[in-house]
Amino acid sequence: MPAVPGRVAGVRDIIAVCPRPEPVVMAAALEARVSLLFRVGGAHAIAALAYGTATIPRVDKIVGPGNKYVAAAKSMVAGDCAIDFYAGPTEIVVVAASGRPAWIAADLVAQGEHDPDARAILITWSRPFAERVARAVEKQSSGRDIVRRSLAAHGAIVVVDSADEAIALANRIAPEHLVVDRESLTRRPLTAGAVFIGPYTAQAAGDYATGSNHVLPTAGAARFRGGLSAADFMRVMSVQRVTRAGLARLQPTILALARAEGLTAHAKSIEVRLR
């Protein structure tokens, strides 16, 4: 997920870490033109990438999702190594009041199987629908220990008064994944890392096949940014060229502002060029 936009942006060396890479993961890394893949993960992998070791090179930027320990490690090294954002633990908010309860339940259970810290929330304005989904979740999560723990700690079904209130609450959460059961709900402003519209747009489709990058902001970070893209690997610089005549025209503005700030040396640096 991070390698493709990195290559698109022209990053020369891409280093990946994975504690237990399956053969298919290593094959995907080759296809994505990953330069190096190290069998390491967790907070110590973040430290290794940020500061370098005898075998793992220091990198310029760390991107990608992880559990709460990875997210904490990224926040700790952010002063020394650039990061994208805090991507994890994963979360889903479903806004729906109709449809097939088993399908909604399947999305909530799928989110819960990531880890015990995953968050899965349904917001609805139909109490009967909420009850049907709750029964379907109970049935589908039977025998799934991680799902049960996740839903017990971080799962919820919230019943509100209206569709407008449901969207307003979802926007306050600013979830990583927002699933809405009908097109009409998207006519309101939405705040999420990625939005999935309609009964067949399963969130898992976004994980694997629909083309959106799956490194997405969590814990409300969608309020100020979207998912990972090639822009995360670009540097933006402003470049200026000014002639003597141009500087003379700008001089009154520059001198007035510099003196208003009490920065007389700034003003002097302009005056000395125009004597």
Image: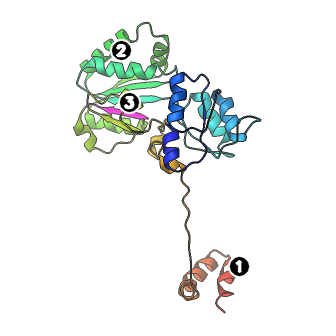
Q: Residue type at mark 1: give it.
A: Ala
- Residue drawn at x 57%, y 38% is 34
Q: How many marks?
A: 3
Q: Which residues are magenta?
A: 175-181
Q: Residue at x 66, y 45 (%)?
A: 81
Residue denoted by label 2: 137
Give the mark nearer the N terminus: 2 vs 1.
Answer: 2
Q: Nearer the viewer, residue 238 or 93?
A: 238
Residue at image location 59% in from the left, 87% down from the top: 244
Quarter holding the C terminus is bottom right
Give the labeled residue for mark 1.
265
Which label's residue is closer to the chain start, 3 or 2? Answer: 3
Cβ atoms under marks 3 and 2 closer than 8 Å: no
Label 1 close to label 3 by CB (< 8 Å): no
The CA span between labels 2 and 1 is: 68 Å
Question: Disc 1 versus disc 3: distance between alpha carbons?
Answer: 55 Å
Q: Is residue 263 visible?
A: yes
Badge 3 is on which residue? 93
The foreground one among 246 and 157 is 246
Spatial distance from mark 3 to mark 2, Cα to Cα? 15 Å
Callout 2: 10 Å neighbours few (<14), some, many (20+)? many
Count neighbours of disc 1 (C-alpha within 10 A) and say few if under 14, some if 14 to 19, many if 20 or more.
Answer: few
